[in-house]
Image: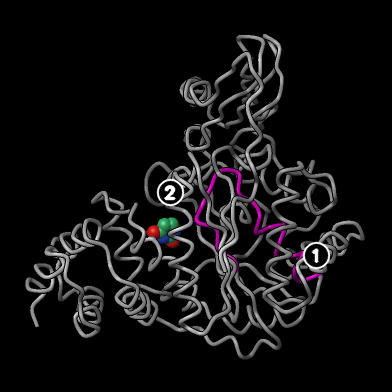
Amino acid sequence: MRIFDIITKKKHGCALTDAEIEYMVDGFVQNDIADYQMAAMLMAIWFKGMNDHELFVLTQAMARSGDMIDLSAITGKKVDKHSTGGVGDKTTLVIAPIVAACGGKVAKMSGRGLGHTGGTIDKLESIPKMRTSLQQAEFFSIVNKIGLAVIGQTGNLAPADKKIYALRDVTATVDSIPLIASSIMSKKLAAGSDCILLDVKTGSGAFMKTLDESIQLAQKMVAIGEQAGRKTLALITDMDIPLGAAVGNSLEVIEAINTLQGNGPKDLTNICLQLAANMLYLLDKGSMPECLAMAQKTIEDGSAFTKFAAMVEAQGGDTAFVYDTSKFARARYCKRILADADGFISKMNAEKCGIASVMLGAGREVKDASIDFSAGIMIRKKYGEAVRKGDILAELFTSEEKRLEEAALVYKTAIIISKTKPVQIPLVFARVE
Ligand code: URA
């Protein structure tokens, strides 16, 4: 078999055999296939796509390129959740404790920020002393004891995806449905949970900008999960505007804690309840209305917040910050963005809001850069709200004063104020089973 012939075949739009796909993935992981050959292959897939069988075989080969985690040492059914990435998306911090408070098991491996989107592990690390890298035995033992733990991906989880993703990032091949579906699902299959809830984001701040593409992506991922014997469903949720009011690591942790205590922004609270209810539904905890009521109760009775605090404690974090969020360090510099006209916020480009937050220091502009945990944005006026000239639209926070001006310029270009009230955007567009 020669990779040259396999590339040629895909270039002409032909379906690859199982053996060809496995040869390509194994060869690339073992460095027998060069980056430039894989880059050509990825571009051929970008143009010609893959049929459902090819996609399943590719995903399995990528999942099996590293450890396939066996979660059987954790009692009961395990449910995982994956977001395709967004701005202000701190849902994992809220829904994992809700599900655990309802008796579900969440053994979650999360990622770091990517591009303009934030990552759960960076957010959790803004809690002093929080450990996000645990040995498997400790990870399992925490989940058995309290129902949840959230750690970073182990080095050997789907290494094929790690290598392929790095190449996609620099060859303009990220935005391909088969490549995104295989990337996400290979990690989910390797992570070992019985059920998977996919939160597929759509809109300006998402990788998939249109609803049609998002639904297609969700359908492909659900089909892969089901074929692999995992109960899988997807919600298509809005990422045209940032989620909640906080963008940036410790700001988002504080907002997640407020939400767990029943004082979160409406959009974030609602979406977390919907996602958590769907996870409980996957775990066969009841009908959708019953699962929604169960999720709601854990916020009202404080049990979800108690689970969050228990997780922080079990992972070594300083719980004093959880019980008193005023202890989180505040950024040294703040700039207010003011409305320059009367009207309504009729556009908030989520991607630009995310870029402004990265520019303030909340994300990485180069690989392995350190993060300013207190940097970010507090949005004071959201999409659809009425504003008067001079009102505060947002507050920008950073530890480095020189970052403020450029980030402020980007944030301003994300916002449009117009005379008429815009239509309401749904939080959940569709559910794919
Ligand atoms: N997230 C992933 O893990 N992979 C992609 O390809 C896109 C988003």
- As helix, strand or loop, the secondary structure at mark 1 comes to helix
Residue under label 1, please give it.
289
Residue 87 percent location from the top left of the image: 55, 43
Mark 2 Cβ inside 8 Å of ligand 1: yes
Name the quarter where the N terminus is drawn: bottom left
Residue under label 2, please give it.
207
| As drawn, 97 above or below 58 | above
Gap in angstroms between the C-alphas marked 2 and 1: 31 Å
- As helix, strand or loop, the secondary structure at mark 2 comes to loop
Residue 238 percent location from the top left of the image: 58, 46
Label 2–label 1 contact, CB within 8 A: no
- Amino acid at dot 1: Pro
Closer to the camera in the image, 14 or 67: 14
Q: Quadrant of residue 315?
A: bottom right
Tell whether position 100 is magenta: yes
Q: Quadrant of residue 308?
A: bottom right
Mark toward the start of the polypeptide (2 vs 1) = 2
Q: Residues within 10 Å of mark 2 (few under 14, many from 20)?
A: many
Closer to the camera in the image, 391 or 370: 391
Q: Which mark is residue 409?
A: none
Q: Residues within 10 Å of mark 1 (few under 14, many from 20)?
A: few
**Picture residue at 28% right of the left edge, 56% below the top:** 168
Q: Is residue 258 left or right of residue 350?
A: right
**Picture residue at 20% right of the left edge, 57% below the top:** 43
Which residues are the magenta region? Answer: 81-101
**Picture residue at 26% right of the left edge, 58% below the top:** 167
**Picture residue at 45% right of the left edge, 50% below the top:** 212
